[in-house]
Image (cartoon, rainbow, N blue to C red):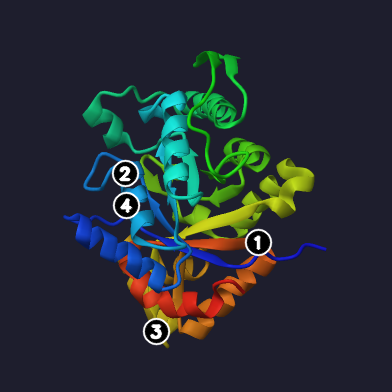
Amino acid sequence: MVVNRRFRFATGGFYAPSAREYAGLARKVEDLGYAALLLPDHFGEQLSPFAALVAAANATTTLRVGTFVCDNDFRHPAVLAKEAATVDLLTDGRLELGIGAGYLGPDYAKTGIPYDDAGTRVSRLFEAVTVVKGLLGPTPVTYSGEYYRIADLDGFPKPRQQPYPPLLIAGGGQRMLSFAAREADIVGLIMKSREGALDFEDGSVAATARRVDWVRTAAGTRFDDLELNILILDVRITADRRDGAAQIGRTWGISADQVLDSVHFLVGTTDQIADQLQDWRDQLSISYIAVMPEFMDQFAPVVSRLAGT
């Protein structure tokens, strides 16, 4: 019998123009009951993730901090391992390390970083995860792959969390999710993109259930140890679910029915949303919910009701 994990909630990704204001935002996240502050990794109007995560941890007491997610193509895995271990050490073991294959074309176009095909980027990520895990471990690493070569390198410093900080890998396809099921501690369930745009039909409950089946099959006996994560793109607290779904649909260019059938939108009263999340946990084993920062205040009553239950 599968025992449901307790709910955890996260938000983040915001910008602040000063250390004082950023610390205040981090404390607010913690005070609202969120378990983690997560930062993306892009070249747009956002802070560099690792320094900002240390600042957030220094401003709070128990708030976990994480990358959501690091683009593997922006750093050699030896550099990423050193950054992650340092952050975990300086935050007293509060880091969650999210790493992905990269997807945002403008990041590559504007920096000149080569934007290889998806299959190549994913294969490179697989090698990088092996290298990062090894360098966070207790012994020197020698590795020879298609994309990376490591020669007797002993990663330093070592992270506070052993054998390494919780690793988050997200995916929408079977290859990526199967790898995440075998290698990650937290598996993010995301919809696919088509020509650079999100495929909202791929975010349905049925499509997500198919992803969970892929994860379950690939994970085998370790499935119960995994934490499944989703990102909520939009939230409407309202007594009229249909009208709220129509509002979200107009924002995202989809129908109200698509909104109501998606695991990436939440609409209804606080009680209705809490019930929906409990249903998703029962049916899909999803227990780690991240919300976009612009919704963290209105979503806070749901966090207060469900966090830790």
Give the CA distance from mark 4 to mark 1: 34 Å
Quarter assignment of residue 243: bottom left
Give the CA distance from mark 4 to mark 3: 35 Å
**Number of residues whose C-alpha sits closer than 10 Å to that of mark 1, classed few (under 14), some (14–19) or many (20 or more):** many
Give the CA distance from mark 3 to mark 1: 25 Å
Residue 51's disc number: 2
Badge 2 marks a residue whose secondary structure is: helix
Give the CA distance from mark 4 to mark 2: 6 Å
Q: Are marks 3 and 1 in contact (CB under 8 Å)?
A: no
Give the CA distance from mark 2 to mark 3: 38 Å
Give the CA distance from mark 1 to mark 2: 35 Å
What amino acid type is highlighted by mark number 1? Answer: Leu
Q: Nearer the viewer, mark 4 or mark 3?
A: 4
Q: Nearer the viewer, mark 4 or mark 1?
A: 4
- Side of 167 relative to 234 (left or right): right
Q: Is residue 279 above or below residue 39?
A: below
Which is more N-terminal, label 1 or label 4?
Answer: 4
Q: Are marks 4 and 1 in contact (CB under 8 Å)?
A: no
Q: Which residue is mark 1?
A: 284
Which is more N-terminal, label 2 or label 1?
Answer: 2
What amino acid type is highlighted by mark number 3? Answer: Thr
Q: Nearer the viewer, mark 1 or mark 2?
A: 2
Towards the viewer: 102 or 154: 154
Q: Which residue is mark 3?
A: 238
What amino acid type is highlighted by mark number 4? Answer: Ala
Q: Position of residue 285 (x, y in %)?
A: 66, 61
Q: Position of residue 186 (x, y in %)?
A: 58, 49
Badge 4 marks a residue whose secondary structure is: helix
Q: Are marks 1 and 2 in contact (CB under 8 Å)?
A: no
Q: Which residue is mark 4?
A: 55
